[in-house]
Image (spheres, coloured by chain):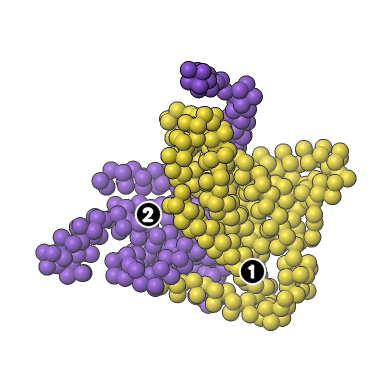
Chain colours: A yellow, B purple
Amino acid sequence: MIIVTLILIIYEIMSTAWPAIRHFGFHFLISSTWQPNRDIYGVLPMIIGTVTSSLIALLLALPLGLSIAIFLSESFLPATMRHAIRFIVEMLAATPSVVYGLWGIFVLVPLVQDYGDIISKHFGFIPFLRGPAYGNSLLTASLVLALMVLPTITAISRAALVAVPATLREGSYALGATRWETILRVLLPCAAPGIVAATILAFGRAIGETMAVAMLIGNSQRLTFSLFSPSNTLSALLANQFAEADGLQISALMYAAFLLIIMTLGTNIVGELVLRYTHRRCATA
Amino acid sequence: MSITQNFFNQLGRKTSFFRLIRNYLLTLFCGFLSFIALVPLFSLVYLLIKKGLLLLHLSVFTGLPPPPGIHEGGFGNAILGTLIMVGIAVLMAAPLGILGALFINEYAPSSPLSGTVRFVAKLLTGIPSIICGAFAFALVVLTTGKFSALAGGVALSVLMLPTILLTSEQALKGVPSSYRDASYGLGATAFQTIWRIVLPEALPSIMMGLMLAIARAAGETAPVLFTALFSYNWTSSLMEPTASLSVLIYNFSALPYHYQVQMAWTASLVLVVMVTGTNILAQFFFRRKSF
């Protein structure tokens, strides 16, 4: 049944996308024009936007998530506080993404607008920081994505850290290692595959995240490389255009949806495989 | 004598100053990062409560969304729409998911088919929710020619199915195999064992999984955005565009009217309370009834 569901999903999307696939072929991936009024479609800017926003989000979320995971798995804090933080992080995971979007509009957009102008004025010679700075930009979307993948990274990394056999930890302390020597030299290396898997799965989640990004990224179909300019992602494109699309545009959007499936499925399969490999390694450790 | 002396001296050796300092600094650094990560969250909760409470009256639950310029009304139809669509989704996904879990855990636990189903279900949980929307769009909206609550429900059910299947399977795994052996030992058939012994025992955990799936689906926007669309009126049929809380938040947040934006905040508060409430209820339900 569930296999049928997946096949049905891919079949329905493929068959609706077929006219666009036949019409544009591979060119769809490398063209950067998206003009519904002329029926010309290409998704290169969105693919680049999807990948860069997710990568930046990971770069920001990984150190934060990892430190929370370390704090939660070691005895830095009293148990009640650890429970409180865990509860908060779980709530963070359950909060609907439109709410993040709304929060982003009111907090992040003005923040990026103000500081972005200052930064691009002083550091504008760096291509990634070129102005003018817009509130609805690639950076804003990346920031909100970072916040949204934080619970994923924290939960899976924490599980990986907790799974490290207690004997290894005790052995390290018995040899006279300080707490951080134990964490950096023993716990993290042993939990590394799990943390890598967490990162990959979080990447898959960031790629597919739609609403908050659609509300914050500015939805520009142009190809840009600055953090402060409006950009777009595959999923935000779908969210914005599906309701009013017709004819070949529906087909082109389905093609984009198909690409999105391929990207997330690929990422998740890799993540699952790494996670499986971890289990095997922990059993022998 | 001197060897022993030397040994004890070594044992008492102090941890070097550098190592202690580094230990301390790293703790501080790590605590600082964790703190930074929690700041946006507190800001989110604070704004949600502060801005959300502004318009929170009883009329919000009974009124209709105000068009621009009008300063009264609520989102009763959106709450109802969300409930209807989640209801449709549960009706479709729950039987399939639970039966599927029964199949892979009770009837054919180690067949290659079950392994594949498990793997595919895991992959499906990772599929972006907007894809479920695109799927329902192709399957229902394009076929029937209009946006409808039914299409939204289908989209949400696709989203829920793998979650329900996986949590139900975990629930069934939690039933001790001695129960099954005892049941078979007393001469019960496979159907009797599952229906009378295994299912009642696993029910609390299955319900918990179901409620977590419901909570997640209620908060989702992307699948219903272009399947159910939005409506300013009460729902009168499953085959017409229907409002939902999440789409209301999305639409109103982009409007340039202050009152509508305020309403988006209030709707967010209601939605978050609904979702978190369901989550907490689910865990409470589960903890109380099992073991």
The residue sitting at the right extreme is A125
Q: Tell me the subunit letter for badge 1.
A: A
Q: Which mark is residue B209?
A: 2
Tell me the SS state at disc 2. helix
Using the image, determine if residue A67 lies above or below residue A246: above
Q: x, y (%) of residue A243? A: 62, 66
Q: Nearer the viewer, residue A166 or B216?
A: A166
- The residue that disc 1 covers is A259
The residue sitting at 80% across, 56% down in the picture is A224
Q: Give the distance between the C-alpha atoms of the residues marked 1 and 2, in whole angstroms.
A: 30 Å
Using the image, determine if residue A191 lies above or below residue B199: above
Give the image quarter of residue B185. Answer: bottom left
How crowded pointer 1 is (Cα within 10 Å; few <14, some 14-19, many 20+) is rated as: some
Left or right of B42 in this view: B87? left
Residue B33 shows up from this direction:
yes
Q: x, y (%) of residue A148? A: 58, 47
Give the image quarter of residue B85. Answer: bottom left
Using the image, determine if residue B32 lies above or below residue B69: above
